[in-house]
Amino acid sequence: MIMTIDQNQLSSADFIKNEVLTLGFIKGQTSVANRFPELYGEAAIAYDIYSGKHKKSTPTDFIFGCELIMEVENKSCIIFIEAEVLQNYSLATYALSMCESDGAQKKLIRKFHFDYDPQGNSTFDKKPKYHLQYGGKATSKLKENDISTECLQHWLSVPRFSIIPINLALLLDTIFNEFPSEETKKITEGNEWRKMIKTNEDKILLPYFKSVSQFISSNHKSTSLFRDFVYGE
Amino acid sequence: MIQRKKPKKKLKFIWIDDTPQRRKSADNMSKELNIDVDFCDLKNKNVNSELQSISSKPEPDLVLMDHSLDQADGETTRSGSSAAAILRENWHACPIVSITGTDIIDMDTRHRSAYEAIFQYSDISRSYPKIMAIAKGFSSLKQKPPTTIKEVLDHLNVPEDERVRIIKILPGELKDNFNNKSLLLEIYRWCESILFKRPGFLYDRLWASTLLGLNLDGFKQVEAKFNSAKYQGVFTDHSDERWWKSELLSILGEEVDQVGLPWVMGRALVDNKKDYFSKCYVNQEEFPETVAAVDATNDAEWHPMKLKYTDPHPIFEDMLFFEELRMMKAAE
């Protein structure tokens, strides 16, 4: 039997259902509403729309974007988080864009994409199934805010680094931990938040590590490297 | 055997006034609303002893109180608000609304707080829906007084998805002490001052239409689709309707294929006809993101506006889970 790094990955429908649950979780969090009203507002609106949309049907696509204003290394930064997951993972991408702002003008200073591409090993554009990419094309939020990606040489889409899978909850948790403040600590150290992250680690990370563990214990050899495994070869 | 439906008990109001000519208005109200209205004429009478006598009787569904009792016996209570306080000694959960011949704005805060609502006498028939909403709301609460938070939420008919958030912002007196004699009054006051007044959980017509990217005419075109989002809990006032924001969005999600901003999605409901689009009051730009007051006065008009043309409203503090209320920026 062929082993793949994403063999235990949730189906796209279950993955999207879980993303909607995360929005619902955020909608109920007073700590988020108090400290990150933009995230809270966008999540609450998106959750209500999705919950109506999926009263009678299973979700097939998930699109979400929000803006956070955070202190990063003593500087105020605008951080955009965007998610786009389409049916059967024909697209599954999470973007993190960081901008500095001098009032009217917003300037892009960092931009990362976290992608899952189940077709990782196409001949012409080989990439790890779960990968991180620096730069990349402008996202909807950047376009909406008229923020140019020129400064990051957006034409360049390599290298792509193999990473662990991610979703909205895990990305937010990473951001809150990487850009810590009294505000973020109050959120991430709360019991409810930790429980929610544990659920997401169970759903997203455990299946990944199970596949890796299976591979390493049974099929790891010079003709079948971990590198081959992450590229889906 | 055919079971006959028990006839609905007529609501009973008491109208306390020192202007006997208003008896005619009480009779009109009785006929129009199909309720019993007892008119108590206090002209030249001792208000205190009259009130003692009135409040020794069974509690009515609502009291209409003349705010100025200056034609009553000079030695006794002269204001409706003091009279209301006397009535409440026996009638703990009776709504008392004021009828005033003078401008409501002229009434000071202490007097205002004695009443559940204040109505201009000259405008009384236009206030019937509101008066009935108050009376029916109290009547329904009295039939089954809440003894748990869940029962409070049931009376408010809160959608399942909103219950956790509402519990988080309910004031302590509505969560902790169900033996409190004035619990029903507290519920009403919270609904009136917060739940119905501040856009957040509930939206009025202007906020609802702006959320959907539509003007009031546009919203009228699609309003029927959102009927199930209407507030149907206690104190529902059919002349001033509210919609649950979460239900508006949920129905929008059901109705429109795409996912995105509600004010973009909503336009699909009117086939993207520009005549029905909501526009910014300041310069007619599309996609106003908020509804803001034109100035800081009490009777200021509220209009859809782009955020960039507004500032936080100086009077309204931010409240968790409610919209930030804003005001049009002063012209530079």
Image (cartoon, coloured by chain):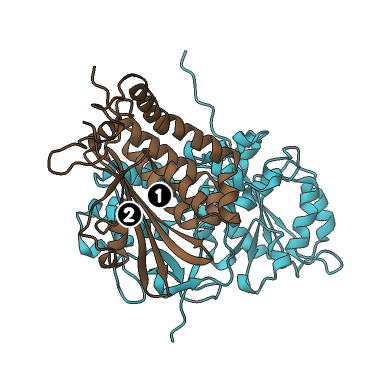
Chain colours: A brown, B cyan
Residue at point 64%, 53% (across, down) = B189
Residue at the far left: name it: A124
Q: Residues within 10 Å of mark 2 (few under 14, many from 20)?
A: some
Residue at 24 percent across and 57 percent down: it is A137
- Callout 1: 10 Å neighbours few (<14), some, many (20+)? many
- Mark 1 lies on a secondary structure that is helix
Image position, residue A37 (x, y; %): 49, 56
Q: What residue type is labelled 2?
A: Leu
Above or below, comparing residue B293 to residue A110 in the picture: below
Q: Residue at x 31, y 62 (%)?
A: A142
Q: Mark 2 lies on which chain?
A: B
Q: Can residue B39 be seen in this view?
A: yes
**Residues marked 1 and 2, same chain:** no
- Residue B153 in percent (x, y) is at 57, 39
Question: In this view of the protein, which residue sits in the foreground, B62 or B324?
Answer: B324
Whether the residues at callouts 1 and 2 have beta carbons within 8 Å, the answer is yes
Residue shown at 49%/37% (left/top)? Answer: A197
